[in-house]
Amino acid sequence: MPSSGITKKKRERVLMAKFEFGFEESWFRLIIKKLPTHPRLFCKDKESVANAQTLLRIGSLKVGAAGVWAQAANIIYKKKNGEYELTPFGKLIAILDPDLEEDGIWWAIHYNLARYKSDAWFYAFYINLFEQKTSERASLETEIRNYWDKDHKKPMTDSTFDKLIFPPFKQVFDGTRLGQKFGLFKPLEENRFVMVLNDSHRVPHAILCYALTDWSQKDQRQSAHISKLLEPWGPGRIFGLNRETLDNMLIEIADRYQKKVAWISHTANLNSVSILNVSPLVMLSTFYHEMDGKEPLVAFEAAMSPKSVEGSP
């Protein structure tokens, strides 16, 4: 994959989308519950905006931000007629976990926000390309602005970073479990912060498989060296896994699902990861079947069944 996660034209479009605010977990819960019966929730006319303010319990500017983040998280999409609908990912959440209680679904949301060509490009930059685990706001600003400026004639202004980049970026981590609980962004003193993932809240195996299958299908590959998964935009990098942890999880995934999803081969020191053509949503459904107490293989087979929950592949 290219080293840059988003094209110049795409960046210009998403900057215009104006991520004036981050989002809170409650916003996504309300969107998932309210959007199916209010498809004009994020339309720009005054009536729709006023209705959205009431339903989402937020101000008008935050309504726009909520819609932009929900699209970046692959929860909603805009139809050709201008109305909005839950994506298949969003519909499955609405059935299995409408209150977004499980940590696993937040890891999946994190993956969607951080993956290649994410609309939330500054979030994706931080997760994939910002190398400093302990840093200061000034260092992050310098690198984000350099990243932006290399594809634009007009450099990013102080105002743009101060109003449209850093505040919503930080608010996402402050308003969700992605920050302190998961360890993706922990504020320190004097505008410093650190990324130290909490072992007790690591990504579940089925959600890693959700990302592996999505990544492999978008990159049109069925195998890859394990190092590829640890590069920017790879699932290992996005979930903050080191090589040893990723290797162990791949061995465990092969055992849990009997090589029906993915496995790693160490033969002749190849360290090659095979990934089968399984729908990512099947793995999301598998995760919830496991949360219901099913053994991993039983959960996977239940998720693959045509009689599985409505909205599942």
Image: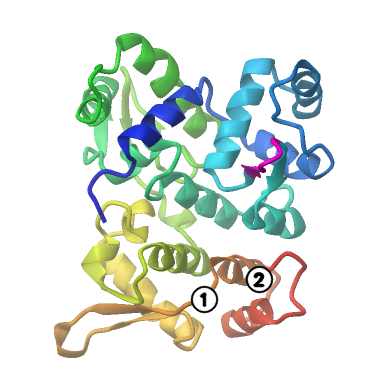
Instruction: Tell me if residue 195 can be seen.
Output: no
Label 2: how many residues lie within 10 Å, few (<14), some (14-19) or many (20+)? some
Distance between mark 1 and mark 2 Cα atoms: 10 Å
Q: Quadrant of residue 62?
A: top right
Indicate the position of residue 13 as horizontal and vertical percent values: 44, 29
Give how far across and how far down residue 287 sits, in percent: 60, 68
Q: Is residue 81 magenta?
A: yes
What kind of residue is marked 1? Val
Which residue range is magenta in the image?
A: 77-82
- Is residue 223 magenta-colored? no
Q: Which mark is residue 102?
A: none
Q: Is residue 294 above or below residue 47?
A: below
Circles 1 and 2 in contact, beta carbons < 8 Å: no
Query: Which of the pair 155/134 is nearer the observer?
Result: 155
Is 176 in front, or is 237? 237
The amino acid type, in three-letter code, at marker 2 is Pro
Element type at marker 2? loop
Numbered label tally: 2
- From this viewpoint, is residue 47 visible? yes
Q: Quadrant of the C terminus?
A: bottom right
From this view, report whether residue 241 is shown above or below residue 74: below
The reply, left or right, for residue 309 in relation to residue 191 is right
The structure residue drawn at horizontal position 81% and vertical position 23%, both measured from the top left corner, is 51
- Residue carrying label 2: 313
Q: Quadrant of residue 63?
A: top right
For the N terminus, the image quarter is bottom left
Spot the residue most to the top.
159
Q: Residue furthest left?
A: 268
From the image, give the main secondary structure of the stretch colored magenta. loop
Read off the residue under disc 1. 278
